[in-house]
Image (cartoon, rainbow, N blue to C red):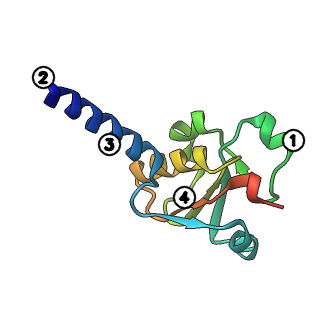
């Protein structure tokens, strides 16, 4: 009976790690490096926070597509040919968004580490 307990525990830990770790093939960028990239017209900048958060403070050039709407809007509003740079408040939602974009077939996805909390 102990082996079932350990199996359930191992599966739970694997599930948690999979949620926390970045998706395979997703690049990570610091906010310092982002500042140098902002004028690149060959990249798409997406803020996945809520409209209220975006309205309160955002980086010029970023388009607001809330995480809950990303799967429906991504293919209509974003090009798979260009790199997509994703930001949120802390980096957690943008990490989830990056996974969604990868599953939708976007090959060049970058997550901003630390999100708006790290931006100053």
Q: Give me the disc on residue 14.
A: 3
Q: Earlier in the sequence, mark 2 or mark 4?
A: 2
Q: Earlier in the sequence, mark 2 or mark 1?
A: 2
> Can residue 48 be seen by looking at this rendering?
yes
In the rendered image, which quarter contains the N terminus?
top left
Q: Earlier in the sequence, mark 1 or mark 3?
A: 3
Q: Mark 1 vs mark 3: give the one in front.
A: 3
The residue depicted at 72 percent of the width and 51 percent of the height is 63
Q: Mark 2 vs mark 4: give the one in front.
A: 2
Q: Earlier in the sequence, mark 2 or mark 3?
A: 2
Name the residue tied to disc 1: 56
Mark 2–mark 4 Cα distance, whole angstroms, equals: 52 Å
Query: Is 28 left, or right, of 23 in this rendering?
Result: right
Query: Is 67 left, or right, of 75 in this rendering?
Result: right
Mark 1–mark 4 Cα distance, whole angstroms, equals: 27 Å
Mark 3–mark 4 Cα distance, whole angstroms, equals: 33 Å
């Amino acid at each position: 009976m102990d082996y079932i307990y350990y199996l359930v525990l191992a599966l739970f830990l694997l599930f948690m790690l999979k949620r926390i770790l970045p998706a395979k093939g997703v690049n990570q960028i610091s906010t310092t490096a982002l500042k140098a990239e902002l004028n690149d017209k060959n990249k798409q900048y997406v803020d996945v926070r809520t409209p209220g958060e975006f309205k309160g403070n955002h980086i010029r050039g970023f388009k607001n597509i809330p995480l809950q709407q990303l799967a429906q809007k991504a293919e209509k509003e974003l090009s798979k040919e260009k790199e997509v740079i994703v930001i949120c408040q802390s980096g957690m939602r943008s990490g989830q968004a990056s996974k969604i974009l990868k599953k939708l077939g976007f090959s060049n996805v970058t997550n901003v580490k630390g999100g708006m909390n790290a931006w100053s």
